[in-house]
Amino acid sequence: MTYAAERPSEELRKIEPFQRHVEAVLNAKGFNLRIELRIFSTYTEAQEALYSGNFDFARIGPANYVLARERKAPVRLLVMESHQGDTFFEGAIFTRSDSGLTSLADIKGKRFAFGEQTSTTGTYLAQAALVQAGIKASDLSGFEYLGRHDKVALAVAAGTFDVGATNERTIEKYASRGLKKLKTFVTPTQAWVVNERLDGRLADAMRTALLHVDQDALKYIDRDGFLPGRESYFDELRKAMRLSRQFGG
């Protein structure tokens, strides 16, 4: 299972060929199975599936991994996605190039577009950065949670909102529409988890398959591989998520 950070059809286009590759690798190792892919349209739907244990394997964002652990969901970290050989990448608060805004201090009195309410870069880390800069919900003229990252980027580019928050990939994708970063922050990459009740042999086979995945299959998910993960990689994110509660709203 996974969730749609972009349009569900775009997520499916990226991950389905990769899914079939992993399925073939597992079957070659003696597991006669077929992987059924479920793409949830919202983070909330994906969270409920995690909390209820209604999954075998899942690809989830770092904040949702932290929340799942806090809720004692039956998740065990399998691997993390590699971003240029690292388990961290950037998110950013951004605006239009012609907005006249040059720092977070300029955001007061402006309209802000966040992503899903439990988005790592689209909400938690952005709100933590605002709190650190002395900006809370009451200091803005308004804000909304728009859901997918692409919706946030397009809303800011269109001038519907003055400022937004998303991941570095989305800003790069829509850079031609005149977007610029005001503040960047670091986040762990996506976590691939397994239901802790799943047969241990199958979970180990899945982990091995991902750590040694064929490079041709990786182009479908826009990552350069997978790396072992550790709970400590999420420590700073946990602190930021706690700080973000001071944003209010």
Image (cartoon, grey):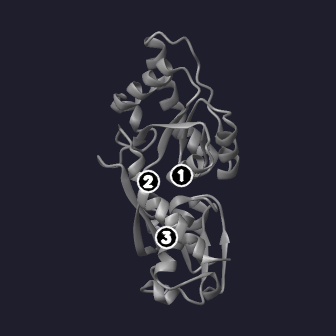
Name the quarter where the N terminus is drawn: top right
Q: Which residue is mark 1?
A: 66
In the rendered image, is residue 93 in sight? yes
Q: Residues within 10 Å of mark 2 (few under 14, many from 20)?
A: some
| Disc with the residue nearer the chain's start (3 vs 1) | 1
* Residue 223 on image: x %, y %: 39, 43
Q: From mark 3 to mark 1, how far is it between C-alphas? A: 33 Å
Can I make out residue 158 in this image?
no
Residue 142: where, in percent of width, then height?
67, 82
In which quadrant of the rendered image does the C terminus lie? bottom right
Q: Amino acid at mark 1?
A: Val
Q: Is label 2 or label 3 in front?
A: 2
214 displayed left or right of 9: left
Vertical relation: 243 (above or below) 207: below
Residue 234, which numbered label? Answer: 2
Residue annotated with mark 3: 177
Q: Give me the residue at 47% from left, 18% from top.
A: 201
Q: CA distance from mark 1 to mark 2?
A: 7 Å
Question: Closer to the N terminus: mark 1 or mark 2?
Answer: 1
Q: Position of residue 165 (x, y in %)?
A: 52, 69
Mark 2: amino acid: Phe
